[in-house]
Amino acid sequence: MLQDPHATRVLPLSSPPLLTCRDIGRQFGEHSAVSGLSFQATRGEVIGLLGPNGAGKTTSLRMLAGTLAASQGELALDGEAFDARASQRQLNRLKQRIGYLPEGAPLWPQLTVRETLDCVAGLHGLSRKIRNYRLSELMERLDIAPFANHLCAVLSKGYRRRLALAMALIHDPDILLLDEPTDGLDPLQKDSVRAFIRELGRERLIIVSTHLLEEVPRICDRVLVMASGRLGFDDTPAALAAMSLDEGILGGNRSGYGAGFGATSSLPVWRLTLGRALNDRELASASRLSGVAAITPLTQMSASSAGALANAQADVQDCTLRLTGRAGQDPRPALARWCGQMGIMFEECVRERGDIETAFRLLVMRMASEQGQRQGQNHGQLRERAGHQVRDHGQGGSP
Ligand SMILES: Nc1ncnc2c1ncn2[C@@H]1O[C@H](COP(=O)(O)OP(=O)(O)OP(=O)(O)O)[C@@H](O)[C@H]1O
C-alpha cells in the first residue's frame, strides 16, 4: 500500500513494538535529508529499507542507531524514549541493544581480526567467557576464522564486510541495523550472509538498507521505500512487486474495462492470451463476467506505464490481455466458458505476481512527481505570501 505520511503501521496487539519512530526528521543546514519518518517495528521482523541514492536511508539508520541526533520527532525502544528526551545514561543503555553495520565501516588496520572483535566485545563490557564464546561463534558463522590472526589492513573487501558484520553482532543486540550488508561479497557469501540474516531475524528486529532488489523477497518480510527523505511505501515484498501490475500507479490514463483499476496491487492478476483480439463490445461483455474486476488489452495501457514496463512486455499482441480478478474470486472458469460460447480460443492464462524492480522504479517515479508537485505548491504559496507582503507593504507605505 502507498504510505499515508501521517499514518503509523498498526501492529497486532500480541506484538508490542520494539521500535517506534514518530515523525522523525533530520536537517543538514537548509537541506532536509529525512522528514516525517513514522513506523513501528517489532521483534521477528526483517525489514528492507529501499530508496534511490540520496533518499535518506543511511541518515535514517544513523538516527535509529543513535549515532546521529534527529532534528525532530520521537524515537522509542520498547516504549522508552531513545532521543533528546532521554538522559545520557539511558541512551548508553539503550544503545547496547542495537547493533549497527555502517556503510564502509572503518576498521583498525593495525589490529588482527581476533583483536578487533575482542576489543569491540570489551567496549560492550562482555565478560571474558562470553567474549570468547561469541568470538568463536561469529568467526565460524561468518567464515572469518581462517583469518583470525590476519591484520585488518590486509583483508579483502568481502572479508572486511564480514568482520564489520561480526562487530555489529558481538554483543547479541535486539535490533540490527545493516547498511548494505552484502556489498562486496561474492555470490556464495552473499547467499550465506542472507541466510544468516534470516536466521538472526527470528528473534531480533533487523532493518537492512540495500540496493540489491533481488535480495528483498529472499530476506525481508516487510519493505519500506524512501525517496527524497520521505517514506512512500510500507508493506510486504509481494505487495511491492504487485504494484508493477498496477497501471494506476503513475496516475496515468486507464483504459481498462470494469472496476478495480488503481487498486489492482491487492487483487489477483493474470496474463491472458486468446486466439484473437477482442473488440470493445466483447471486452465490455467479458468485464461483466463473474469474478472479473477488469480486463485490458496490454497494448491499450497508458503510454507512460507501457514505457516503464517495456522490458517485460515488449512482445505484447492485441490478443494478450491483463485479467484482474475480484478479491477472493477466480474469474477464469466464467471467462473460459464465455470464450467457448463466443468461439474464441482460450490459449493461455498465467498468474502474474509482478516484479520488484519495475515496481520500485514506478514507485520512485511517482514519489518524485508527488514531491515535485508539493514543492510547486510550496513555491506557489511562498509566491502568494510574498505577493501579500508586497501588497501589504505597499498599502501600509501609501499616504
Ligand atoms: N553529514 C551530512 N551533511 C550534509 N548533508 C548530508 C550529510 N549526510 C547526508 N547528507 C545528505 O542527506 C541526503 C540523504 O543522504 P543519505 O546518505 O541518507 O542517503 P542514502 O539513501 O543512504 O543514499 P545512498 O543510497 O547513496 O547511500 C543526501 O542528499 C546527502 O547528501
Image (cartoon, rainbow, N blue to C red):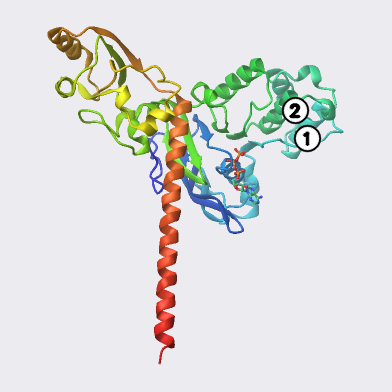
Task: Please state which of residues 123 and 147 is positioned toward the viewer in this rendering.
Answer: 147
> Considering the numbered disc 2 on the image, is that residue within a helix, a strand or a loop?
helix
Which kind of residue does numbered mark 1 sit on?
Answer: Leu
In the drawing, does residue 336 fall left or right of residue 214?
left
Q: Which of 248/43 is in front?
A: 248
Q: Could you tell me if the residues under marks 1 and 2 are in contact, i.e. CB atoms within 8 Å? A: yes
Seen in the picture, residue 120 relative to 191 is either above or below; the reply is: below
**Which residue is rendered at x = 43% and y = 34% of the image?**
362
Real-space Cα distance between discs 1 and 2? 8 Å
Distance from mark 2 CB to nearest ligand 1 atom below 8 Å: no
Look at the image and tell me whether residue 66 can be seen: yes
**Residue drawn at (38%, 31%) of the image:** 305
Q: Nearer the viewer, residue 113 or 327?
A: 327
Query: Residue, x 29% and y 15% (percent of image)?
Result: 272
Q: Is residue 85 above or below residue 195?
A: below
Say whether residue 103 is left or right of residue 374.
right
Does residue 130 lie above or below 337 as drawn?
below
Q: Earlier in the sequence, mark 1 or mark 2?
A: 1
Residue 43 % position (x, y): 50, 32
Q: Which mark is residue 107?
A: 1
Q: How many marks?
A: 2
Q: Residue at x 14, y 23 (%)?
A: 281
212 displayed left or right of 386:
right
Quarter of the render that holds ligand 1 = top right
Which dot marks residue 160? 2
Q: Is residue 16 visible?
A: no
Residue 150: quarter of image: top right
Residue 61 on image: x %, y %: 59, 41
- Quarter that holds the N terminus: top left
Dot 1: within a 10 Å radius of its alpha carbon, few (fewer than 14), some, or many (20 or more) residues? some
Q: Quadrant location of the C terminus? A: bottom left
